[in-house]
Image: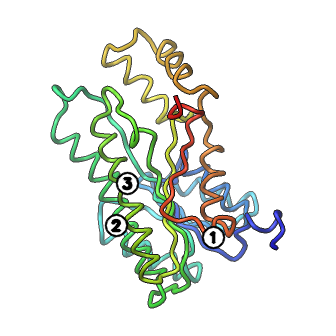
Amino acid sequence: MQSPEKIFRLDGKVAFISGAARGLGAHVARTLAAAGASVFLTDVLSAEVEQTAKSIRDAGGKAAAMVHDVTQEAQWEAAMAQVVSQFGGLDVLVNNAGVEDMAFFAEGSLESFKRIQDINVNGTFLGLKHAIRVMRPDGASGRGGAIVNLSSLAAMIGVTGLGAYCASKGAVRSLTKSAAIECAQLGYGIRVNSIHPGVIKTAMGNHLLEGFVRLGMVPDVATAEGAMLQLHPLGLGTPDDVANAVLYLASPASRWTTGAEIVLDGGANAQ
């Protein structure tokens, strides 16, 4: 039996995290680096993603960064080639990059709906496609691995004003299960799982609260936060709650887990 101290370690592993300049992605990158992984951070925010990578190196970790738009397939190809060249392979992909925008269905624009699907759904699909190509036995890395997709509690429940986001995260949930079964049945040695956070204390979480105010659903952010606290019996989550779940799914501790969804919502979905 492997010791508890070692089963969550990622020594010698290489992890790729999209949307890693700040927020959840940055916390995930720091956590995986602290567990021993070499981390490759990508984002459209060039200065910020470089700074996050530098902070990891300054703390003694191994990290590199690259500017990367997840909606562009050529950029996925370039990023995968770079991580393999720089770190010698790929063991973990965290599809974290994502956006949200709030609008009632009757007022929402098709342009905004398409943008959310493009980043959240197409970006996840492209990550799956190119990570699988690299990780499978005939790939440039060829040693299997783990893919973690960031979905949302919004994939499981309806949320007023978040129709486009709910649709996108529901698609991520289904893509995860399909990819997990396919990779298992084809013998690729790749596990694919999803994480479904409720409201997390990040800039994106604050943007959600502000959106409820903008739509006139509550008078102010304090009221919105109070409503969210009532929805989540254990209170709102923190980035570390999500990062620790990603670590579990990336580590040998979850070697028999694929096609699963970890719900991190403080009990919201249990009510």
In the rendered image, residue 234, in percent from the top left (x then y), is placed at: 64, 28
Q: Residues within 10 Å of mark 2 (few under 14, many from 20)?
A: many
Tell me: 108 left or right of 242.
Answer: left
Q: Who's the residue at 44% across and 49% down the image? A: 151
Query: Image check: 224 left or right of 170?
Result: right
Whether 216 is drawn above or below 38: the answer is above
Using the rendered image of the protein, determine whether residue 69 is visible from the camera's viewpoint: no
Estimate the x, y position of residue 260 in percent, counting from the top left.
Answer: 51, 58
Residue bearing the label numbered 1: 255
Give the amino acid at mark 3.
Val
Type of amino acid at the residue the image marks with label 2 = Leu
Which residue is at the front of the view, 256 or 67?
Answer: 256
**Furthest residue to the bottom?**
138
| Residue in the foreground of this view, choosing between 112 and 191 | 191
Say which residue label 3 marks: 172
Local SS, label 1: loop
Question: In percent of the image, x 60 and y 61: which residue is there?
Answer: 249
Closer to viewer: mark 3 or mark 1: 1
User: What is the three-letter code of the residue carrying label 1?
Assistant: Arg
CA gap between label 3 and label 1 equals 21 Å
Vertical comparison of 87 with 271: above or below:
below
Image quarter hosting the N terminus: bottom right
